[in-house]
Image (cartoon, helix red, strand yellow):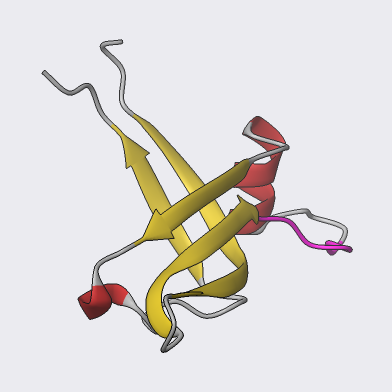
Amino acid sequence: MSVPMRAKLQVGFVQELFYGPDNTKSGEILSFHGVSKNKYDETGLDEDNTFAKFSPSADLKLQVANPGLWGQFSPGDKLYVDFTPAE
């Protein structure tokens, strides 16, 4: 893969995870989906529409165990996700 790719995703929901006898928080599962709108104006000129046109469907789930990242994402947040080659 020599060409990087950028996706625009929206947080669909955040699920908190708990573990152990004291029910301590152990993580979050972040569920993302591709951006889109139910209705666009007649021009269709909208950044979300541009991403939806070329990547019409996307689903991504991440389990976050780092406590420093808990609570940093909320349903409705939109983020860019860059895919670049790794060594």
Percent position (x, y) of residue 44?
Answer: 77, 53
Relative placement, left or right, of 26 versus 78 is: left
Percent position (x, y) of residue 26?
Answer: 37, 73
Q: Residue at x 62, y 45 (%)?
A: 50
Please report the bounds of the magenta region as a residue range. Answer: 35-41
Q: Toward which corner of the image does residue 54 lie, by quadrant?
A: top right
Relative placement, left or right, of 26 versus 9 is: left
Q: Is residue 19 magenta?
A: no
Q: Quadrant of the C terminus?
A: top left
Question: Taken as a whole, is the magenta stretch helix, strand or loop?
Answer: loop
Residue occupying the far top of the picture: 1
Q: Residue at x 41, y 89 (%)?
A: 22
Residue occupying the far front of the picture: 21
Percent position (x, y) of residue 27?
Answer: 39, 70
Where is 27 relative to 9, above or below? below
Of residues 32 and 51, which is closer to you in this image? 32
Q: Residue at x 42, y 76 (%)?
A: 20
